Image (tube, rainbow, N blue to C red):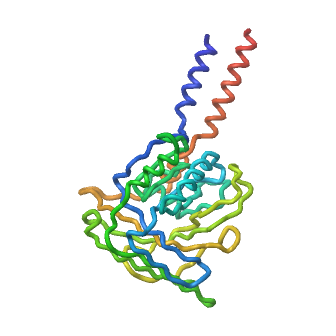
Amino acid sequence: MRVKVILMALILGASMLPSSQAGSPENLEDVGWVFGGVYLDANESGNSTSSLSELPAIVEDYTATWCVNCVTVEDALNDIAENNNMKTYHFHRFINENEDPLGSQEGDDRWINRYDQRLPPTVIFNGTIRQIGSIPDGDSLQDDYNKNLETSINLGIGSSSLGWAVSNNSSPIATWNLAVDMSNFPQDSEIKSYLWVVEEVAYFPDGGNEEEYYHKSVRTIIDLGNATTGSLEVTLPAAYDGDDLQVHLIHEVVLPEPDGETPEEPSEEETEDEDDSSLPSIGLVAVVAMTMFAAVTVQRKQQ
């Protein structure tokens, strides 16, 4: 009887561990839209412009090379990409990461500061709809994701433009311009712009999910500030392999702080604690498993 009670307690404890398997779509009320997506190859000079109405939906996927169920999520995103105007960006886990070589400090900082978590797999649509896990809320992940993309954002009339000048003697220079009518955005909000440096394909055969080829990995984020137009000399990171970096212009709506509230920057210790809590404790799982094994062994000996 005592052994059975122990086993029941252990099973209950294991069931309370964090899970990255399931989640319903969630509207994020405290962050603004993410939009943009014009891009250029980092090796060549060029210019790219799009009207705001023709910009793709921005899909952010938080992933890791060891995350097996992330493959299910990414397959579903690939399936719906054929029938949707969308761009998917994969953010790989970086802080406290021992296996995945494709993440960045800037990427993890973004997910912590903006989304308050970095749990793979998590998908964000246009910056404001979050769906965690690989088990669908509806009939399939494809149906879920298509529905999430139906929530369109009205950016109004305007354009987003990116220029990229490559020189043999100096670092490349990015120029950008955002023509936008702020009356289409929440009152007192502002728009910040960023360059997302993306590696088109990286070959990593040692990933635990056995994907080997990892597409559209965000290797770093460069803050362009809140100016609607400007230029900046850019220092690019090294590609993991090959020579296929791209620069993507992304805009983010920053909502005004509620009256009387001042945002607090998390301390380094708080960030580390949050990072550790984003994944199930492997040590705790191991202890539970070993204790259950020991309990079963004791029961057999008593019999």
Q: Is residue 75 left or right of residue 252?
A: right
**Quadrant position of residue 34:** bottom left
The location of residue 186, given as percent across then percent down, is 27, 62
The location of residue 11, given as percent across then percent down, is 58, 25
Q: Which residue is at a point 29% across and 65% down the rendered structure image?
A: 185
The location of residue 71, given as percent across then percent down, is 62, 50
Q: Is residue 83 left or right of residue 292?
A: left
Asked if one can make out residue 175 in the rendered structure from this viewpoint, the answer is yes
User: Which quadrant: the C terminus?
Assistant: top right
Q: Is residue 214 left or right of residue 277?
A: right
The front one of 262 and 180 is: 180
Looking at the image, residue 108 lies above or below residue 67: below
Looking at the image, residue 140 lies above or below residue 157: above
Q: Which residue is at a point 55% across and 68% down the rendered structure image?
A: 220
Looking at the image, residue 116 lies above or below residue 88: above
The front one of 65 and 162 is: 162
Asked if one can make out residue 227 in the rendered structure from this viewpoint, the answer is no
The front one of 173 and 78 is: 78
Q: Which residue is at a point 51% across and 40% down the rendered structure image?
A: 22
**Quadrant position of residue 216:** bottom right
The location of residue 116, given as percent across then percent down, is 44, 52
